[in-house]
Image (tube, rainbow, N blue to C red):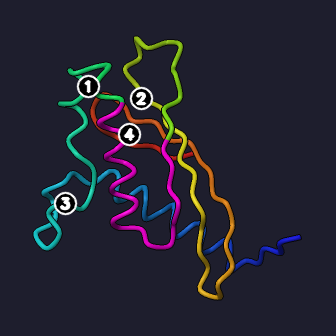
Amino acid sequence: MERHTWKDQDLEQAVVSHLIRMLNTRQGSSLTCPDYGLIEVSEMLHDFPDAIGIVQRAIKNSIQNYEPRLKNVQVRHIKNEAMHTMVLEFEITGQLHYPDGRRSALRFSTAVDQSGNVKLG
């Protein structure tokens, strides 16, 4: 049985906070890392439904490139029955690597709206 401490929760929260900041940053915004962040999603939604795969890969690539504490990242599109809302929903899973070598599964959902805002839950 895995035992979680307050430090574990701090690390999990730090990773989630970083993902929120990173996925709400547009590529090209950082002078030192021009590919940091997510592509301009609002322009992609005009290519719906092709945009689903493009955004899905962009989220996965950003996490793999800029969040080293999360490994084996998978991003799965969650079909939204009310597609008229123009919100893309994804489930992100991965393995959180702790400094002491332990690992634990991390899973959360994310929603990308038509203006490109990303919410993690």
* Residue contact between numbered discs 1 and 2, judged by CB atoms under 8 Å: yes
- Sequence order check, earlier mark of 1 and 2: 1
- Identify the residue position indicated by label 3 in the image: 35
Badge 3: residue crowd in 10 Å (few <14, some 14–19, many ≥20): some
Marks 4 and 1 sit apart, C-alpha to C-alpha, by 12 Å
Q: Which amino acid does label 2 sit on?
A: Leu
Residue 86 at x, y = what percent? Answer: 37, 20
Q: How far apart are marks 2 and 3 (CA)?
A: 22 Å
Residue found farthest to the front: 72
Q: Name the residue under label 1.
A: 45
Q: Which contiguous range is marked in magenta?
A: 53-75
Viewer-side residue, 93 vs 29: 93
Q: Earlier in the sequence, mark 4 or mark 2?
A: 4
Question: In this rendering, which labeled residue sits more in front, label 4 or label 1?
Answer: 4
Q: What element carries label 1?
A: helix
Tell me the SS state at disc 4: helix
Name which residue lies at 32% across and 19% down: 49
